[in-house]
């Protein structure tokens, strides 16, 4: 095969699509397509607001950006990397992937291949996306065009495990199209590829990767609740248990983001559609979704223990993104902590220099403070950004709390109970 034979369009230029488009452009002529005119303008100017791709890499002569579908008409490979979120009822929101399929159907030609990377339930590519491609294009699947599925495995902010260094699962609807899909990814993925026997298998593999992590974290969260009632430090328990060779040291925490807290609902949706009601998966989801309330209630209890009146008290939440050192606020569970505290008539400030203030306000209606300039009655250390290591040292935490007896809610266990109590703080961690 010759690289000149393939022109690729990557649809959706977020945390997944942009790094993929840049990587593919090292071997193929690649177009990045996104419906956001603002996003395209920024990328053309060499600015990536997700901080995943360096400015100089966006200036490659084999990489272009557009929000006009007509600019993608010469492509013969379309890779769809749009989000697959859930709605307020925890049901799959398929509108982005259906919209992307409709758009690509409008430019699809004979012998083109459409590859989906978005996380979906097993069967969605062939059952929901293919009919849209056929209907809009007027072409016949497997006769005029083919589809493949290669689940994304991007970990935002992780420079060690970049796309090219993670084994890529690939699948397609025919032997011939699988050869093409395998070849394209094989040219840029140095870690190698794994060929799944069917598209459904590849879809299932992706969705269980995060479901497994979700359940393991749910177990640790439930243990954290139990140990809290027994006045036992969960971190100490995990350290002790980790001395056994086959213990898996998962940690408790708030499960947000676009994957772990979302993907299991795609699997359970499909399971219920075929007549099976999942029990273990949904139980884990309930536990993880309840942890924000548990954290907020612990903050209120902490203030009461310190003889502080929760009503009209001032609480600072440090960190708002769903994980450390990344500006991604999708499905962040910190917002639920914020809302729970507000239920107690608490005044809540949120500080996060990593998050985009405009994005936070537009998405959640919360105005971030740009600096910590007052004293508080409770401090919630929600995200362990590197930039917090000095600014939120234990000494500074004491100052932020007005050098008084007050609760330090240390979600990420940055400090120990002993350290906090030595500084006259009421300490809580998961």
Image (cartoon, rainbow, N blue to C red):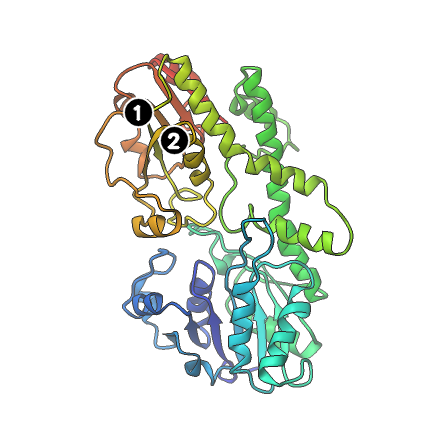
Q: Is residue 88 left or right of residue 26?
A: right
Residue found at the very far right of the displayed protein: 275
Q: Is residue 125 left or right of residue 159?
A: right
* Residue at figure coordinates x 47%, y 40% from the top left: 333
Residue 221 place in picture, x, y as percent: 57, 31
Q: Is residue 264 above or below residue 3?
A: above
Q: Are marks 2 and 1 in contact (CB under 8 Å)?
A: yes
Name the secondary structure under disc 2.
Answer: strand
Q: Is residue 71 above or below residue 93?
A: below
Label 1: how many residues lie within 10 Å, few (<14), some (14-19) or many (20+)?
many
Residue found at the very far left of the displayed protein: 373
Residue 59's label in the rendered image is none
Depth check: 317 or 57 in front?
A: 317
Residue 15 place in picture, x, y as percent: 44, 58
Name the secondary structure under disc 1.
Answer: helix
Residue 126: name its quadrant. bottom right
Residue hosting label 1: 397
Residue hosting label 2: 381
Residue 423 place in picture, x, y as percent: 33, 15
Q: Earlier in the sequence, mark 2 or mark 1?
A: 2
* Residue at figure coordinates x 68%, y 57% from the top left: 204
* Residue at figure coordinates x 29%, y 15% from the top left: 404
Residue 199: name its quadrant. bottom right
Depth check: 92 or 212 in front?
A: 92
Residue 299 place in picture, x, y as percent: 43, 24
* Residue at figure coordinates x 54%, y 23% from the top left: 234
Q: Is residue 330 left or right of residue 317?
A: right
Query: How far, Cα to Cα, is label 2 from label 1?
Result: 9 Å
């Amino acid at each position: 095969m010759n690289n000149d034979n393939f022109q690729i369009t990557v649809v959706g230029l977020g945390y997944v699509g942009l790094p993929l488009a840049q990587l593919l452009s090292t071997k193929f002529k690649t177009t990045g397509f996104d419906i956001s005119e603002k996003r395209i303008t920024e990328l053309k100017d060499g600015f990536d607001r997700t901080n995943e791709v360096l400015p100089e890499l966006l200036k490659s002569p084999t990489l272009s950006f557009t929000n006009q579908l007509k600019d993608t008409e010469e492509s013969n490979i379309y890779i769809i990397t749009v989000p697959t979120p859930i709605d307020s009822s925890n049901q799959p929101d398929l509108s982005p992937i259906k919209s992307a399929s409709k758009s690509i159907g409008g430019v699809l030609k004979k012998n083109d291949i459409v590859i989906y990377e978005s996380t979906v339930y097993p069967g969605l590519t062939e059952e929901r996306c293919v009919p849209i491609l056929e209907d809009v294009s007027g072409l016949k699947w497997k006769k005029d065009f083919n589809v493949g599925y290669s689940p994304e495995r991007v970990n935002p902010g992780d420079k060690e495990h970049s796309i090219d260094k993670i084994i890529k699962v690939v699948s397609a609807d025919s032997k011939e199209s699988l050869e093409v899909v395998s070849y394209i990814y094989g040219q840029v993925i140095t870690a190698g590829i794994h060929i799944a026997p069917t598209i459904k298998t590849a879809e299932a593999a992706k969705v269980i990767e995060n479901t497994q992590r979700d359940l393991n974290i749910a177990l640790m969260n439930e243990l954290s609740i139990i140990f809290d009632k027994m006045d036992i430090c969960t971190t100490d328990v995990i350290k002790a248990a980790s001395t056994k060779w086959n213990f898996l040291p998962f940690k408790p925490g708030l499960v947000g983001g676009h994957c772990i807290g979302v993907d299991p609902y795609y699997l359970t949706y499909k399971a219920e559609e075929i007549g099976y009601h999942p029990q273990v998966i949904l139980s884990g989801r309930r536990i993880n979704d309840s942890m924000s309330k548990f954290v907020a209630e612990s903050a209120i209890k902490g203030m009461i223990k310190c003889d502080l009146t929760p009503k009209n008290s001032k609480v600072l939440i440090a960190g708002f993104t769903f994980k450390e050192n990344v500006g991604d606020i999708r499905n962040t569970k910190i917002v639920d902590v914020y809302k729970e505290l507000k239920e107690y008539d608490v005044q809540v400030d949120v500080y996060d220099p990593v998050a985009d203030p405009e994005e936070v306000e537009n998405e959640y209606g919360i105005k971030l403070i740009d600096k910590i300039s007052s004293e508080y009655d409770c401090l919630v250390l929600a995200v362990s950004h590197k930039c917090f290591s000095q600014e939120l040292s234990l000494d500074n935490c004491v100052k932020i709390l007005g050098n008084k007896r007050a609760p330090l809610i240390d979600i990420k266990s940055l400090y120990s109970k002993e350290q906090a109590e030595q500084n006259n703080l009421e300490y809580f961690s998961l």
